[in-house]
Image (spheres, rainbow, N blue to C red):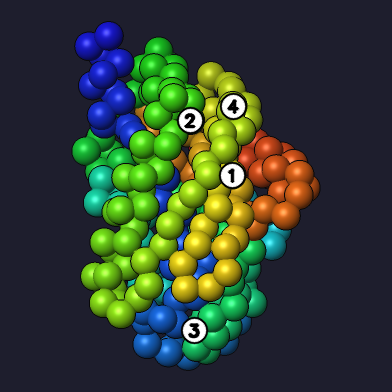
Amino acid sequence: MELFGMLDRLFRPSFSLALLLLLGLSTAYPQAAPPAQPLPAETQIYRVGLKSIAIASPSKDLTEIGPDYRVTLETLAPATNRLVAAFIRPEDLHQILAGGNTPLTRYALVEAPRRAVFADIDTAAFKTVADSVATQFGTNLEADIKTAQDDFNHNLKELNSSSATIAIDKPFSLGTLFSKPDAAAFGMIASISGAGPEIKMAVATVVLRLQNRVLFLYLYSVYKDDTAVKWLRTTSEQWADATLKANAQ
C-alpha cells in the first residue's frame, strides 16, 4: 500500500481538458503568421527524462505543431506535468494563428509527470501506476474533475484576466478502454460550459511505459454520439501500439 500511495502521488494524470484549444487560442495569444507548409505527420523524437523517445502521430489527420508553436500551449499543462507534444489538424493550426476562434473537434496532447520524469519504472511498478489511474476514473472521478476545473480556471486567468471561467459538469466514466503490459487507457465524457454554449467532450487518457519512463497521452473529441467513443477507443489503442513499436529495442 505504501508503494501504491507513492506512485499514486507521483503519477496522477491531469484531467485538464486543455479547453483553451477548444475555446480558441486567439483569446489568449497574439495573432501570428500561419506556417507556410503543413507540419510533418510522421513519428518524431522527443527528450523525456534523459531518454530520446519516439512518439507516433495519433491519426493521419492530427500532426504535431512543432516547438515554435508548442511553447504557447505549455501553460495549458498542469504544474505537475510538462507538455511534450501537441497534435491538432493542420487547418486548425492555420485558423488559430490567423486569429480565428473556431472550436477544435479533435486534438491530442502528450505530457510527462515532472516529479517522476527520471524515475525508472519496471513492468510491476507500471501495473501499480495503471491501477492507480483506473481508481481515479472510478470513485475519485468527480473530485479530480473539480481539481482540474479549478486549476484550468487559474491558468486561464493567468493568460487573460478577462476570460470567462469554465465549468466541467456531469463527468461520466467510460472505464478501461484497453489494458496491456506497457499501456492502459481510460475514458470519460464531460459537459463543458463557459463563454459559449455547453459542449460535451469525450476524453481518453493513455498511460504508457516507454524505455522505463511513463507518459500520459490524451485524446479529445467532441461528443455527439457513440461514434466519438468508438473513435477514442480505436485511435487510442492504435496510437499506443504505434508508439510502443517505435520504441521497441
Per the image, label 3 sits on a secondary structure element best described as helix
Per the image, label 2 sits on a secondary structure element best described as loop
State how far apart marks 3 and 4 are (Cα).
36 Å
Q: Is residue 176 visible?
A: yes
State how far apart marks 1 and 4 are (Cα).
13 Å
Per the image, label 1 sits on a secondary structure element best described as strand
The residue that disc 1 covers is: 189
Identified by mark 2, the residue type is Phe
| Among numbered discs 1 and 4, the one appearing first in the sequence | 4
Residue 147 rendering spot, x and y as whole percentages: 32, 45
Where 194 sits versus 188, above or below?
A: below
Per the image, label 4 sits on a secondary structure element best described as strand
**Residue in the image at 59% along x and 44% along y:** 189
- Observer-side mark, 1 or 3, equals 1
State how far apart marks 2 and 3 are (Cα).
34 Å
Few, some or many residues within 10 Å of mark 3 (<14, 14–19, 20+): many
- Observer-side mark, 3 or 4, equals 4
The residue that disc 4 covers is: 176
Identified by mark 4, the residue type is Thr
| Among numbered discs 1 and 3, the one appearing first in the sequence | 3
Do residues under tags 2 and 4 come within 8 Å of each other at their CB atoms? yes
Residue 139 rendering spot, x and y as whole percentages: 44, 25
The residue that disc 2 covers is: 137
Left or right relative to 175: residue 235: right
Do residues under tags 1 and 4 come within 8 Å of each other at their CB atoms? no
**Residue in the image at 36% along x and 36% along y:** 143
Identified by mark 1, the residue type is Ile
Quadrant of the rendering where the N terminus is positioned? top left
The residue that disc 3 covers is: 97
